[in-house]
Image: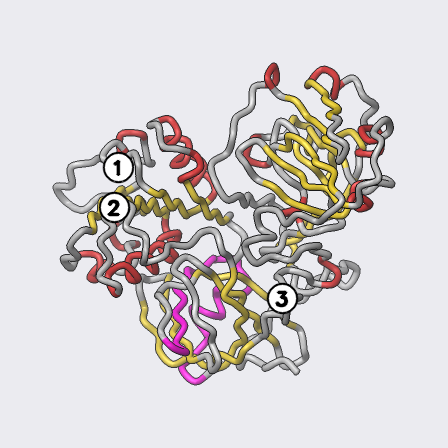
Amino acid sequence: MRPLPWRAAKLVEIRQETRTARTLAFAVPGWPGHLAGQHVDVRLTAPDGYSTQRSYSLAAPEDGDRVELTVELVADGEVSPYLTEVLEVGDLVELRGPVGGWFVWRPESARPVLLVAGGSGLVPLMAMIRARRRSAGLAPFHLVYSIREPAQRLYPAELDRPDPGLRVDYLYTRATPGGYGRPPGRITRADLLTADPDADCFVCGPTGFVEAAADHLIALGHDAARIRTERFGPTGG
Amino acid sequence: MAIVSRGFQGRRREESVKLPPGQYLTYDFPVLSAGPTPRIPLDRWEFAIDTEAGQTHRWTWPELMALPAEQPTVDLHCVTKWSKLATHWRGVSLDVLMADVETTAEYALVYSYGGYTTNLPLEDLLDGKAWIAYAFEGEELEPQHGGPARLLVPHLYLWKSAKWVRGIRLLHEDWPGFWETAGYHDYGDPWREQRYQGD
C-alpha cells in the first residue's frame, strides 16, 4: 500500500467563528475525500527547513477538493497561533489524510445518534451534522454542546436554523444567556437523561469532559460498545 | 521538497533533544482512547497469556505484584504527534511473564478490558523491551492512563502500549488489532514515522 501523500493546500476562505476560533477552507488538489469525523495532519515548514505537524478534525463533509478545518487558538501553542492569526488567503500549508476510521459517522446509517461536544470538540461532530443534513438523512440527531459562555459557541447561526430531526441542547459552564433555565455548571448525568439510550454516541472534547460524559452515559445504561470518544488535552495546539 | 508556509517560524527545540520525525515535545500527559474508560476491580483483574497450542497462563493481581518488578525510564511517542521524555514506570517485564511459556509463535495480539486490541511481533515484547506497568511517576496508574495495568512497549507508537491490558494471544499469523484495522500502521516505529498504513 502506498503511503498517504502530503498535499499542498492553499487557503481559499477564512470565517472567524468566535474571538479565538476560525474556520479555514483549503483547496487541496487531488484530495481523495473523507468521512465525517475524520481528521488530517497539517505540516508547517519554516524557511530554514524546520517543520512541525499537528492533527485537526475536519469540520465539513466531503466536498471535492475543498477541505475545512476549524482551529481554536491555544494560547501557548506553536501551530494554532499561526493558523488562527497569521495565515492568509492564498497561503500554503501541507495536509495529509484523511486519518481515522473509527470516530466516523456514515450517512447510510439510520440509527439514532447522540453527539456530546465540549468546546472545540464540536468540530468533528459538526461535520456529522452537516453530512446528515446534506444527505437528507433519516437518523435522529441529538447534540449536547458544553461551552463556557454564549460567546464561545461555534457555528451559532447554523445551529439555530431549523434542521428537522436535529435537537440541540446547550450547557454553559460559566455564564448563561439571560433567562436560561439551566444554571451554569459542568455536564451532569441529568443533562444526558433525555438522550436515546440506544443511540450511537460520539463524545469529543478535552479529556476531563470526555471522561465525565462517557462515565455518565455508562451510568445511564448506554452500551460501552456504542460510545466512541475522541479526546484532546491542553497540548496539541 | 516541503512547501514553506509564509510567515511560519515555529519554535526551535533544544539542540540536545532528539525526537522522532514529526513529533513535538510535551510535558503533560495527554489521554487518547477510543471509548469510555473501563473500571476493573483488582479482585477481578487477571492477566493471561494464551499460546498457539491452546495453553493459558494466568496471573491474578496479587500474583503479578509478587513478581520481580523493574523501574524503566522511557520516552513515549504518540502517533498524534506528542512525545514525552524520561517517564518513570514500575512494572513486570514480559521476559518474566514469558519465562515458562512454551511457544514458537511469531506474533502477539494484545487484548484489553473494554475490547481494545493491538498486534505486534512477539520479539518486540521480549529482551527487556516491554512491561506490564502498574505505576507511573511513583503513583498507581490512573484508569484514564490505562490502570490498573497497561502494556508498556515504548519503542513503538503509544497505541501499541495497550491500556487496561487483559492478555496476550500468541499466534503464528499477524492479526491486525483495533487501530491497525482502522488505517494505522501494522508495526508503528516512530523513528521511521510509521503512522499510517503504507508509511
Q: Dot 1 corresponds to which residue?
A: A196
- Camera-nearest residue between B95 and B83: B95
Q: Which residue is mark 3?
A: B11
Establish if B88 lies above or below B197. Answer: above
Tell me if I can see residue A166 in this picture: yes
| Residue B56 percent across, percent down from the top left | 73, 25
Q: Nearer the viewer, residue A108 or A190?
A: A108
Local crowd size for mark 1, using a 10 Å CA cut-off: few (<14), some (14–19), many (≥20): some
Q: Residue at x 25, y 31 (%)?
A: A193
**Compared to A107, does A24 lie above or below?**
below
> Would you say A215 lies left or right of B120 here?
left
Question: Do pointers 1 and 3 mark residues of a single chain?
Answer: no
| Apparent side of residue A215 relative to residue B165 in the rendered image (left or right) | left
Badge 2 local density, few (<14 within 10 Å), some, or many (20+)?
Answer: many
The span from disc 1 to disc 3 (Cα, nearest Å) is: 46 Å
Find numbered disc 3 in the image and state the secondary structure of the residue it sits on: loop
